[in-house]
Amino acid sequence: MSTTMETLIEVRGATRLLSDNFALENVSFALRPGEIVGFVGANGAGKTTVVRAILGQLHLDAGKIRLFGEPFGSAATIEAQRRLRGRIGVVLDTCPFPAELKVKQAAACIAPAFENWNASTFAALLDEFGISPKAKVRDLSRGMGMKLQLAVALSHGADLLILDEATAGLDPIARDETLDRLREFASSGQRGVLLSSHITSDLERIADHVVGIDAGRIAFNLPREQITDAAGIAHCTTDQAREALNVLAELNDECELASNSMSSEPAVYHGSAATAHDPFATFSISTPRAIRRTYCTDVLVPDRFAFAQAFPDIACDRATIDDYLQFAINGELRLH
């Protein structure tokens, strides 16, 4: 297990043209020890593509990926790749082990790939998860297949877990057990979890940080509490929404000016790098946006409590991660 506070995952400017219709564009984010980072987006948004790039399964046209502070993928030597892979546990949405093998046979095939494989830990986890070593992989339910992958991931001393839609389709009990296990894993302060999912309720429960992706671009990158604890959805008339957007935009400009005047360092943006041509290249908590509904106009506000004081006649509800993703994709900066 790692004893240093190195960054577990660093994705910086990751870019890859995959087809005429889809590309990863300047994707950047980080995962630090002790964190659970939720990676959210609609199906086809690029979540699995980014995960593949992190795991060294996809070559980038530009940008870089570092794991545990070291280059990974084609930029790393074969020995470095093997060593770093030993520190990563991967759980996918479908069980990747050969269907005809028994669980104990699958483990025998996997064990030689990991220097720190612990057979006793694996056996104990199978017992805890209710998986028979004699069961065939093909006979495992989806939930049991996911638990088998998790047992493997936890049996070789991994410092980083990467899960790609692993909780999709699980029953509520299995999902709760899995989320509890992930929180326990990260609680040491030395290990971390990247949880890629479209099930935002899972992320609201355990994520420390949430990264949203849409059409291959980072849509937002924020501490989870800034989304679910502070932000709100104000239900406005069109005139109220226009006024609210103007006030919030002015406050945002004032905050940026104050921040820049207090620091000689260049501004650092989490997520896709902002540019002089597009200062909101990454949708942030301070970027108000609106969506027109049939009977009202909803405005995403950064602090629903402060908003309620400034606009006491406008109803303002707690925001969710789903709300944030929707506003990041479809929200308007100005109403005309």
Image (cartoon, rainbow, N blue to C red):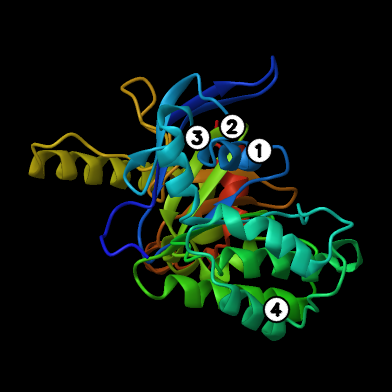
* Distance from Cα at disc 4 to Cα at disc 2: 37 Å
* Distance from Cα at disc 4 to Cα at disc 3: 55 Å
Select label 3 or label 1 by which is in front: 1
Q: Position of residue 185 (x, y in %)?
A: 48, 73
Q: N-terminal of the two: label 1 or label 4? A: 1
Please name the residue that numbered disc 3 is placed on. 334
Seen at 28% across and 65% down, the residue is 3
Q: Is residue 128 left or right of residue 251?
A: right
Q: Position of residue 128 (x, y in %)?
A: 68, 85
Select label 3 or label 2 by which is in front: 2
Please name the residue that numbered disc 4 is placed on. 126
Q: Considering the numbered disc 1 on the image, is that residue within a helix, a strand or a loop?
A: loop
Q: Is residue 152 above or below residue 218?
A: below
Q: Which mark is residue 45?
A: 1
Q: N-terminal of the two: label 4 or label 3? A: 4
User: Label 1 near label 3: C-beta < 8 Å?
Assistant: no
Please tell me how crowded label 3 is: few (under 14), some (14-19), or many (20+) other residues with Cα within 10 Å: few
Seen at 69% across and 18% down, the residue is 19
The amino acid type found where label 1 is placed reads Ala
Please name the residue that numbered disc 2 is placed on. 216
Q: Considering the numbered disc 3 on the image, is that residue within a helix, a strand or a loop?
A: loop
Q: Position of residue 112 (x, y in %)?
A: 59, 56
Please tell me how crowded label 2 is: few (under 14), some (14-19), or many (20+) other residues with Cα within 10 Å: many
Instruction: Assign the C terminus to one quadrant of the image.
Output: top right
